[in-house]
Amino acid sequence: MKIAIGSDHAGFQLKEELKVFLQEKGIDVKDFGTYSEESVDYPDYAIPLAESVARGEEKFGILICGTGIGMSIAANKVKGIRASLCDSKYSARCAREHNDANVLCLAGRVLKGELAKEIVNVWLNTSFLAGRHKIRIDKIINYEKK
Ligand code: RB5
């Protein structure tokens, strides 16, 4: 499995931690930056990552900023992206089961590393349930086609 990961300065430390965590699982990780704690603008990382996931180059993306909010707003502007800000294992499970979310957004200034890893684990191991949820996702996809 290939996963894209990206952050701004506020998410940099957590990005580095999660990158190692994923690589230790044998996952191929593409790092979209940023590469230091120098202040940067989150859309410059969210949009290229989201476009890459939308093209199918990676199965999922993980985006981290201070709150996860800016990253989710920016990533959701890209057609085909369903980015979800998750702060718990429950929200991660629902994001995959109900929303077929393909980008996980995390709050680097809020989440502790251990909880972030648990959220990522749930995300990676949870499949879309389809059924009634697919009807709802299809409505979003149809709107994007307009
Ligand atoms: C950076 O200070 C902060 O605004 C950013 O990381 C993010 O939280 C935006 O949503």
Image (cartoon, rainbow, N blue to C red):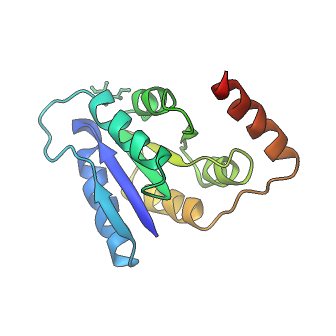
- Residue at left 38%, top 78%? 26
Residue drawn at 55 percent across, 44 percent down: 86
Q: Quadrant of residue 31?
A: bottom left
Residue 74 drawn at (x, y percent): 43, 27
- Between 125 and 137, the one nearer to me in the picture: 137
Q: Most extreme residue toward the right, as rendered?
A: 132
Rendering coords of residue 33 (x, y %)? 23, 46
Figure check: 1 above or below 6? below
Q: Is residue 107 visible?
A: no
Please count the marks in the image. 0
User: Which image quadrant: the C terminus?
Assistant: top right
**Left or right of 72 in this view: 126:** right
In the displayed image of the protein, which residue is found farthest to the front?
A: 146
Percent of width and height locating residue 50: 43, 41
Residue 68 found in image quarter: top left
Q: In the rendered image of this protein, does residue 114 appear above or below residue 131?
A: below
Horizontal relation, residue 63 to residue 141: left or right: left
Q: Quadrant of ligand 1?
A: top left
- In the displayed structure, 93 sits above or below 44; it is below
Seen at 88% across and 46% down, the residue is 132
Seen in the image, is 104 located left or right of residue 125? left
Which of these two is toward me, 46 or 145? 145
Q: Residue 101: in sight, yes or no?
A: yes
Does 21 sit above or below residue 49?
A: below
Residue 136 place in picture, x, y as percent: 80, 37
Q: Residue furthest top?
A: 146
